[in-house]
Image (tube, rainbow, N blue to C red):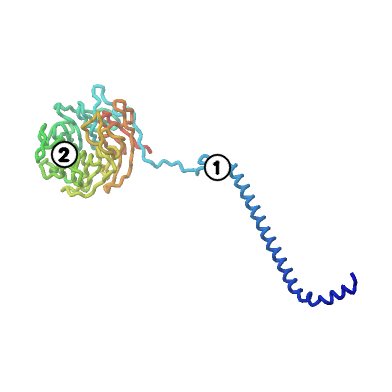
Amino acid sequence: MNPLAVGVFVVNTSPLLVALCPVLSDARRLVRRSLSLAALVALMGFSAALEAADKKETQKKQAQKPAATAETVPLPDYPRVNLAATYELVANWPERPKDVARAAVPSIALDKDGNVWIHTRANPMVQVYAPDGRYLRGWKEEDSRAVPHGIAFDAEGNVWLVDVGLHNVRKYTPDGNLLLTLGVTGEAGNDDRHFNRPTGIAFAPDGDIFIADGYGNSRIVRLDREGNYKKAWGNLGVEPGNFSLPHAVAIDSKGRVYVADRNNIRVQVFDADGKLLEVWPNLITPWGFHMTPADELWVCGSSPMGWTVDSKYPTAPLGCPPKDQVLAKFNTSGKMLELHTFAKGEDEHEKPGDLNWFHAVAVGREGSLFVGDIIGKRVQKFVRKP
Protein backbone atom coordinates (compact mmCIF):
# COMPACT_ATOMS: atom_id res chain seq x y z
CA MET A 1 0.00 0.00 0.00
CA ASN A 2 1.03 3.54 -0.65
CA PRO A 3 2.40 4.93 2.60
CA LEU A 4 0.81 8.23 1.82
CA ALA A 5 -2.57 6.56 1.46
CA VAL A 6 -2.13 4.83 4.78
CA GLY A 7 -1.29 8.03 6.48
CA VAL A 8 -4.29 9.73 4.95
CA PHE A 9 -6.52 6.82 6.17
CA VAL A 10 -5.22 7.02 9.67
CA VAL A 11 -5.60 10.75 9.78
CA ASN A 12 -9.08 10.59 8.38
CA THR A 13 -10.26 7.80 10.77
CA SER A 14 -8.63 8.91 14.01
CA PRO A 15 -11.74 10.68 15.32
CA LEU A 16 -13.78 7.48 14.79
CA LEU A 17 -11.25 5.33 16.56
CA VAL A 18 -11.12 7.75 19.42
CA ALA A 19 -14.91 7.60 19.67
CA LEU A 20 -14.98 3.79 19.58
CA CYS A 21 -12.31 3.22 22.27
CA PRO A 22 -14.71 3.38 25.27
CA VAL A 23 -17.14 1.04 23.52
CA LEU A 24 -14.42 -1.45 22.70
CA SER A 25 -13.18 -1.31 26.30
CA ASP A 26 -16.66 -2.07 27.66
CA ALA A 27 -16.98 -4.89 25.16
CA ARG A 28 -13.70 -6.37 26.29
CA ARG A 29 -14.88 -6.25 29.93
CA LEU A 30 -18.22 -7.81 28.97
CA VAL A 31 -16.43 -10.58 27.12
CA ARG A 32 -14.17 -11.21 30.07
CA ARG A 33 -17.19 -11.33 32.44
CA SER A 34 -19.05 -13.65 30.10
CA LEU A 35 -16.05 -15.91 29.90
CA SER A 36 -15.69 -15.86 33.70
CA LEU A 37 -19.40 -16.72 34.19
CA ALA A 38 -19.18 -19.50 31.63
CA ALA A 39 -16.10 -20.82 33.35
CA LEU A 40 -17.89 -20.71 36.71
CA VAL A 41 -20.92 -22.51 35.32
CA ALA A 42 -18.67 -25.08 33.74
CA LEU A 43 -16.77 -25.51 36.99
CA MET A 44 -20.02 -25.93 38.98
CA GLY A 45 -21.26 -28.46 36.50
CA PHE A 46 -18.03 -30.36 36.75
CA SER A 47 -18.18 -30.26 40.53
CA ALA A 48 -21.77 -31.53 40.51
CA ALA A 49 -20.78 -34.30 38.18
CA LEU A 50 -17.97 -35.32 40.50
CA GLU A 51 -20.33 -35.24 43.49
CA ALA A 52 -22.89 -37.38 41.67
CA ALA A 53 -20.19 -39.83 40.69
CA ASP A 54 -18.95 -40.03 44.28
CA LYS A 55 -22.51 -40.57 45.56
CA LYS A 56 -23.09 -43.30 43.03
CA GLU A 57 -19.86 -45.00 44.02
CA THR A 58 -20.77 -44.76 47.71
CA GLN A 59 -24.20 -46.25 47.06
CA LYS A 60 -22.58 -49.03 45.08
CA LYS A 61 -20.22 -49.84 47.95
CA GLN A 62 -23.08 -49.74 50.48
CA ALA A 63 -25.14 -52.07 48.32
CA GLN A 64 -22.26 -54.52 48.32
CA LYS A 65 -21.84 -54.27 52.14
CA PRO A 66 -24.05 -56.72 54.22
CA ALA A 67 -26.92 -54.98 56.04
CA ALA A 68 -26.87 -54.98 59.86
CA THR A 69 -29.32 -57.54 61.35
CA ALA A 70 -30.46 -58.62 64.81
CA GLU A 71 -27.84 -61.35 64.55
CA THR A 72 -24.94 -59.03 63.67
CA VAL A 73 -25.72 -56.17 66.08
CA PRO A 74 -24.39 -57.12 69.54
CA LEU A 75 -26.78 -56.99 72.49
CA PRO A 76 -25.91 -55.27 75.75
CA ASP A 77 -24.68 -57.38 78.63
CA TYR A 78 -28.03 -57.75 80.41
CA PRO A 79 -27.89 -58.36 84.18
CA ARG A 80 -29.07 -61.96 84.62
CA VAL A 81 -30.91 -61.45 87.89
CA ASN A 82 -34.09 -63.47 88.50
CA LEU A 83 -36.71 -61.04 89.80
CA ALA A 84 -39.80 -63.17 89.06
CA ALA A 85 -41.50 -64.93 91.95
CA THR A 86 -41.54 -68.59 90.94
CA TYR A 87 -42.60 -71.88 92.49
CA GLU A 88 -41.30 -75.41 92.21
CA LEU A 89 -43.31 -78.61 92.56
CA VAL A 90 -42.56 -80.86 95.53
CA ALA A 91 -42.46 -84.31 93.96
CA ASN A 92 -44.49 -87.14 95.46
CA TRP A 93 -46.34 -84.91 97.91
CA PRO A 94 -48.43 -85.94 99.81
CA GLU A 95 -47.97 -89.54 100.95
CA ARG A 96 -51.50 -90.63 100.22
CA PRO A 97 -52.31 -94.03 101.79
CA LYS A 98 -52.78 -96.80 99.26
CA ASP A 99 -56.32 -97.49 100.45
CA VAL A 100 -57.35 -93.83 100.03
CA ALA A 101 -58.91 -93.19 96.63
CA ARG A 102 -57.82 -90.28 94.50
CA ALA A 103 -60.70 -87.78 94.05
CA ALA A 104 -61.59 -84.17 93.33
CA VAL A 105 -60.14 -81.65 95.81
CA PRO A 106 -62.49 -78.63 95.86
CA SER A 107 -61.11 -77.00 99.02
CA ILE A 108 -58.04 -76.80 101.26
CA ALA A 109 -57.44 -75.18 104.66
CA LEU A 110 -54.46 -74.97 107.01
CA ASP A 111 -54.70 -75.34 110.78
CA LYS A 112 -52.63 -73.39 113.34
CA ASP A 113 -49.85 -75.98 113.13
CA GLY A 114 -49.59 -75.72 109.36
CA ASN A 115 -51.20 -79.09 108.70
CA VAL A 116 -53.03 -79.36 105.38
CA TRP A 117 -56.72 -80.27 105.50
CA ILE A 118 -58.49 -81.23 102.31
CA HIS A 119 -62.22 -81.63 101.76
CA THR A 120 -62.35 -84.24 99.03
CA ARG A 121 -65.02 -86.15 97.14
CA ALA A 122 -63.98 -89.58 98.35
CA ASN A 123 -63.68 -91.24 101.71
CA PRO A 124 -62.10 -90.25 103.95
CA MET A 125 -63.98 -87.06 103.04
CA VAL A 126 -61.64 -85.03 105.28
CA GLN A 127 -57.94 -85.85 105.04
CA VAL A 128 -55.17 -84.24 107.09
CA TYR A 129 -51.52 -84.16 105.99
CA ALA A 130 -48.45 -82.81 107.74
CA PRO A 131 -46.49 -80.10 105.92
CA ASP A 132 -43.95 -82.75 104.88
CA GLY A 133 -46.73 -84.84 103.30
CA ARG A 134 -47.29 -87.50 105.95
CA TYR A 135 -50.90 -88.65 106.27
CA LEU A 136 -52.13 -87.91 109.79
CA ARG A 137 -55.82 -88.75 109.97
CA GLY A 138 -59.24 -88.24 108.41
CA TRP A 139 -62.91 -88.98 108.74
CA LYS A 140 -65.58 -90.34 106.47
CA GLU A 141 -68.84 -89.04 105.08
CA GLU A 142 -71.73 -91.44 105.55
CA ASP A 143 -74.33 -89.60 103.43
CA SER A 144 -74.11 -90.65 99.78
CA ARG A 145 -75.74 -87.38 98.67
CA ALA A 146 -72.74 -85.35 99.82
CA VAL A 147 -70.76 -83.23 97.34
CA PRO A 148 -67.97 -81.54 99.32
CA HIS A 149 -67.13 -77.98 98.30
CA GLY A 150 -65.64 -75.87 101.12
CA ILE A 151 -63.54 -76.15 104.27
CA ALA A 152 -62.41 -73.46 106.74
CA PHE A 153 -61.30 -72.93 110.33
CA ASP A 154 -62.84 -70.41 112.70
CA ALA A 155 -60.87 -68.49 115.32
CA GLU A 156 -61.41 -71.25 117.90
CA GLY A 157 -59.98 -73.92 115.61
CA ASN A 158 -63.27 -75.60 114.72
CA VAL A 159 -63.60 -77.14 111.26
CA TRP A 160 -66.45 -76.02 109.01
CA LEU A 161 -67.53 -77.99 105.95
CA VAL A 162 -69.71 -76.67 103.12
CA ASP A 163 -71.59 -79.23 101.06
CA VAL A 164 -73.25 -78.57 97.70
CA GLY A 165 -75.12 -81.87 97.62
CA LEU A 166 -76.46 -81.74 101.16
CA HIS A 167 -77.36 -78.01 101.01
CA ASN A 168 -75.79 -77.51 104.42
CA VAL A 169 -72.84 -76.17 106.40
CA ARG A 170 -71.49 -78.22 109.32
CA LYS A 171 -69.25 -77.38 112.25
CA TYR A 172 -66.89 -80.05 113.65
CA THR A 173 -64.21 -80.38 116.27
CA PRO A 174 -60.75 -81.15 114.84
CA ASP A 175 -61.40 -84.77 115.86
CA GLY A 176 -64.46 -84.98 113.65
CA ASN A 177 -67.24 -84.59 116.22
CA LEU A 178 -70.26 -82.78 114.77
CA LEU A 179 -71.19 -79.66 116.74
CA LEU A 180 -73.68 -77.78 114.54
CA THR A 181 -75.53 -78.04 111.24
CA LEU A 182 -76.72 -74.94 109.38
CA GLY A 183 -79.39 -75.39 106.72
CA VAL A 184 -81.79 -78.28 106.31
CA THR A 185 -79.82 -81.33 105.20
CA GLY A 186 -80.84 -82.53 101.76
CA GLU A 187 -83.43 -79.77 101.31
CA ALA A 188 -82.81 -76.72 99.11
CA GLY A 189 -84.51 -73.39 99.78
CA ASN A 190 -84.13 -69.63 99.78
CA ASP A 191 -85.01 -68.31 103.23
CA ASP A 192 -83.46 -67.84 106.66
CA ARG A 193 -83.27 -71.60 107.30
CA HIS A 194 -82.24 -73.03 103.94
CA PHE A 195 -79.39 -72.92 101.48
CA ASN A 196 -79.35 -73.97 97.85
CA ARG A 197 -76.03 -75.60 96.97
CA PRO A 198 -73.78 -73.39 99.14
CA THR A 199 -70.14 -73.05 98.10
CA GLY A 200 -67.99 -71.33 100.74
CA ILE A 201 -67.68 -69.88 104.22
CA ALA A 202 -65.66 -67.12 105.95
CA PHE A 203 -65.54 -65.56 109.40
CA ALA A 204 -65.51 -61.88 110.35
CA PRO A 205 -63.23 -60.50 113.09
CA ASP A 206 -66.27 -60.28 115.40
CA GLY A 207 -67.11 -63.97 114.82
CA ASP A 208 -70.01 -63.48 112.41
CA ILE A 209 -70.35 -66.14 109.72
CA PHE A 210 -70.67 -65.38 106.00
CA ILE A 211 -71.79 -68.11 103.57
CA ALA A 212 -71.70 -68.00 99.78
CA ASP A 213 -75.03 -69.47 98.70
CA GLY A 214 -74.15 -70.44 95.97
CA TYR A 215 -74.97 -72.42 92.86
CA GLY A 216 -78.68 -72.10 93.55
CA ASN A 217 -79.45 -68.84 95.36
CA SER A 218 -76.78 -66.33 94.19
CA ARG A 219 -76.60 -64.57 97.55
CA ILE A 220 -74.41 -64.01 100.59
CA VAL A 221 -75.90 -65.01 103.95
CA ARG A 222 -74.73 -63.44 107.21
CA LEU A 223 -75.22 -65.21 110.57
CA ASP A 224 -73.94 -64.51 114.06
CA ARG A 225 -71.28 -66.66 115.69
CA GLU A 226 -73.96 -69.04 117.02
CA GLY A 227 -75.40 -69.56 113.55
CA ASN A 228 -78.47 -67.35 113.91
CA TYR A 229 -79.61 -65.69 110.68
CA LYS A 230 -78.98 -61.93 110.46
CA LYS A 231 -79.42 -60.95 106.81
CA ALA A 232 -78.70 -61.84 103.19
CA TRP A 233 -77.99 -59.88 100.02
CA GLY A 234 -77.69 -60.46 96.30
CA ASN A 235 -79.76 -61.94 93.50
CA LEU A 236 -79.03 -63.68 90.22
CA GLY A 237 -77.84 -61.03 87.75
CA VAL A 238 -74.95 -59.24 86.14
CA GLU A 239 -75.51 -55.84 87.75
CA PRO A 240 -72.97 -54.74 90.40
CA GLY A 241 -74.10 -56.10 93.75
CA ASN A 242 -75.77 -59.15 92.21
CA PHE A 243 -74.14 -62.48 91.47
CA SER A 244 -73.99 -65.25 88.94
CA LEU A 245 -72.57 -68.08 91.03
CA PRO A 246 -70.89 -66.67 94.14
CA HIS A 247 -68.29 -69.44 94.27
CA ALA A 248 -66.11 -68.42 97.23
CA VAL A 249 -66.04 -65.85 100.02
CA ALA A 250 -63.24 -64.32 102.11
CA ILE A 251 -62.97 -61.61 104.79
CA ASP A 252 -60.01 -59.36 105.61
CA SER A 253 -58.90 -58.03 109.01
CA LYS A 254 -61.14 -54.97 108.64
CA GLY A 255 -64.26 -57.03 108.02
CA ARG A 256 -64.61 -56.39 104.29
CA VAL A 257 -66.27 -59.24 102.42
CA TYR A 258 -64.81 -60.50 99.12
CA VAL A 259 -66.98 -62.60 96.82
CA ALA A 260 -65.84 -64.69 93.84
CA ASP A 261 -68.56 -63.79 91.32
CA ARG A 262 -67.46 -66.54 88.99
CA ASN A 263 -69.76 -66.39 85.97
CA ASN A 264 -69.51 -62.59 85.96
CA ILE A 265 -65.70 -62.81 85.87
CA ARG A 266 -65.14 -60.46 88.80
CA VAL A 267 -64.44 -60.09 92.48
CA GLN A 268 -66.90 -57.93 94.38
CA VAL A 269 -66.09 -56.29 97.72
CA PHE A 270 -68.73 -55.39 100.35
CA ASP A 271 -68.90 -54.18 103.89
CA ALA A 272 -70.38 -56.51 106.48
CA ASP A 273 -73.90 -55.16 105.86
CA GLY A 274 -73.77 -55.86 102.13
CA LYS A 275 -72.93 -52.35 100.88
CA LEU A 276 -70.98 -52.64 97.65
CA LEU A 277 -67.52 -51.07 97.98
CA GLU A 278 -65.58 -52.17 94.90
CA VAL A 279 -65.80 -54.31 91.78
CA TRP A 280 -62.70 -55.88 90.20
CA PRO A 281 -63.84 -56.93 86.71
CA ASN A 282 -62.07 -58.89 83.97
CA LEU A 283 -58.92 -59.75 85.87
CA ILE A 284 -59.53 -63.42 86.55
CA THR A 285 -62.36 -65.96 86.42
CA PRO A 286 -62.41 -66.65 90.18
CA TRP A 287 -62.89 -70.18 91.47
CA GLY A 288 -61.22 -70.24 94.89
CA PHE A 289 -59.93 -67.81 97.55
CA HIS A 290 -57.33 -67.71 100.28
CA MET A 291 -56.96 -64.63 102.51
CA THR A 292 -53.64 -64.36 104.36
CA PRO A 293 -53.18 -62.75 107.80
CA ALA A 294 -51.46 -59.89 105.92
CA ASP A 295 -54.71 -59.21 104.01
CA GLU A 296 -53.41 -60.56 100.71
CA LEU A 297 -56.11 -62.26 98.68
CA TRP A 298 -54.99 -65.21 96.57
CA VAL A 299 -57.44 -66.08 93.80
CA CYS A 300 -57.25 -69.23 91.69
CA GLY A 301 -59.10 -70.01 88.48
CA SER A 302 -58.54 -69.10 84.86
CA SER A 303 -57.99 -65.99 82.80
CA PRO A 304 -61.19 -64.17 81.73
CA MET A 305 -63.18 -66.03 79.11
CA GLY A 306 -66.62 -66.07 77.55
CA TRP A 307 -69.33 -68.68 77.73
CA THR A 308 -68.66 -71.90 75.86
CA VAL A 309 -70.51 -75.19 75.50
CA ASP A 310 -68.45 -78.35 75.79
CA SER A 311 -69.93 -81.70 74.89
CA LYS A 312 -68.37 -83.31 77.98
CA TYR A 313 -69.77 -80.63 80.32
CA PRO A 314 -72.86 -79.21 78.57
CA THR A 315 -74.54 -77.81 81.72
CA ALA A 316 -71.41 -76.60 83.54
CA PRO A 317 -70.92 -72.99 84.65
CA LEU A 318 -68.68 -70.55 82.83
CA GLY A 319 -65.09 -71.67 82.45
CA CYS A 320 -65.68 -75.40 82.23
CA PRO A 321 -63.35 -76.49 80.89
CA PRO A 322 -61.00 -73.58 81.59
CA LYS A 323 -58.66 -72.45 78.81
CA ASP A 324 -55.74 -72.08 81.23
CA GLN A 325 -54.90 -72.22 84.94
CA VAL A 326 -53.80 -69.13 86.82
CA LEU A 327 -53.22 -67.92 90.35
CA ALA A 328 -53.11 -64.24 91.31
CA LYS A 329 -52.33 -62.37 94.50
CA PHE A 330 -54.15 -59.07 95.15
CA ASN A 331 -53.99 -56.42 97.81
CA THR A 332 -57.24 -55.18 99.32
CA SER A 333 -57.49 -52.39 96.73
CA GLY A 334 -57.60 -54.82 93.85
CA LYS A 335 -54.02 -54.31 92.67
CA MET A 336 -52.55 -57.51 91.32
CA LEU A 337 -49.27 -58.18 93.12
CA GLU A 338 -48.33 -61.51 91.55
CA LEU A 339 -49.52 -63.70 88.69
CA HIS A 340 -48.62 -67.36 88.25
CA THR A 341 -49.59 -69.76 85.50
CA PHE A 342 -49.77 -73.55 85.51
CA ALA A 343 -49.99 -76.02 82.68
CA LYS A 344 -53.58 -77.05 81.95
CA GLY A 345 -53.66 -80.82 82.33
CA GLU A 346 -55.30 -83.10 79.79
CA ASP A 347 -58.22 -85.09 81.19
CA GLU A 348 -56.98 -88.42 82.61
CA HIS A 349 -53.44 -87.65 81.41
CA GLU A 350 -52.37 -85.00 83.91
CA LYS A 351 -48.65 -84.72 84.59
CA PRO A 352 -47.02 -83.70 87.87
CA GLY A 353 -47.39 -79.95 88.24
CA ASP A 354 -50.37 -79.74 85.86
CA LEU A 355 -53.70 -78.46 87.10
CA ASN A 356 -57.06 -79.42 85.69
CA TRP A 357 -59.95 -77.28 86.93
CA PHE A 358 -57.95 -75.35 89.53
CA HIS A 359 -60.42 -75.04 92.40
CA ALA A 360 -58.59 -74.57 95.71
CA VAL A 361 -55.53 -72.79 97.10
CA ALA A 362 -54.00 -72.32 100.53
CA VAL A 363 -50.76 -70.53 101.39
CA GLY A 364 -48.44 -71.74 104.14
CA ARG A 365 -46.58 -69.52 106.57
CA GLU A 366 -43.31 -70.06 104.71
CA GLY A 367 -44.97 -69.19 101.39
CA SER A 368 -45.64 -72.69 100.10
CA LEU A 369 -48.69 -73.18 97.89
CA PHE A 370 -51.13 -76.03 98.36
CA VAL A 371 -53.41 -76.39 95.35
CA GLY A 372 -56.31 -78.67 94.52
CA ASP A 373 -58.19 -79.42 91.31
CA ILE A 374 -61.38 -81.17 90.30
CA ILE A 375 -60.67 -83.19 87.16
CA GLY A 376 -57.00 -83.70 88.12
CA LYS A 377 -58.22 -85.23 91.41
CA ARG A 378 -55.27 -84.33 93.62
CA VAL A 379 -53.65 -81.89 96.00
CA GLN A 380 -50.12 -80.69 95.20
CA LYS A 381 -47.50 -78.62 96.98
CA PHE A 382 -45.28 -75.95 95.43
CA VAL A 383 -42.44 -74.20 97.26
CA ARG A 384 -41.33 -70.67 96.52
CA LYS A 385 -37.89 -70.55 94.91
CA PRO A 386 -35.37 -68.15 96.45
Instruction: Identify the residue at image location x=54%, y=43%.
Output: 68
Q: Is disc 1 surrounded by few (<14), some (14 to 19) or many (20+) residues within 10 Å?
A: few
Q: Is residue 280 above or below residue 361?
A: below
Give the image location of residue 160, x and y in percent.
17, 36
Left or right: residue 258 versus residue 189 is right
Q: Quadrant of the N terminus?
A: bottom right
Callout 1 secondary element: loop
Q: Please tell me in which quadrant of the rendered image residue 300 appears.
A: top left
Left or right: residue 95 versus residue 15 is left
Q: Nearer the viewer, residue 378 or 349?
A: 349
* Residue 232 visible in the snapshot: yes
Amino acid type at mark 2: Asp
* Residue 370 visible in the snapshot: no
Residues at marks 2 and 1, CA–CA distance in whole angstroms: 66 Å
Q: Please tell me in which quadrant of the rendered image residue 134 appears.
A: top left
Q: Nearer the viewer, residue 180 or 277?
A: 277
Q: Which mark identifies residue 213?
A: 2
Left or right: residue 52 versus residue 159 is right
Instruction: Identify the residue at image location x=26%, y=24%.
Output: 97
The answer to whether marks 2 and 1 mark residues whose Cβ atoms lie closer than 8 Å is no
- The mark tally for this picture is 2
Instruction: Identify the residue at image location x=22%, y=31%.
Output: 314
Looking at the image, tell me whether mark 2 or mark 1 is earlier in sequence order: 1
Residue linked to disc 1: 67
Instruction: Identify the residue at image location x=17%, y=41%.
Output: 236
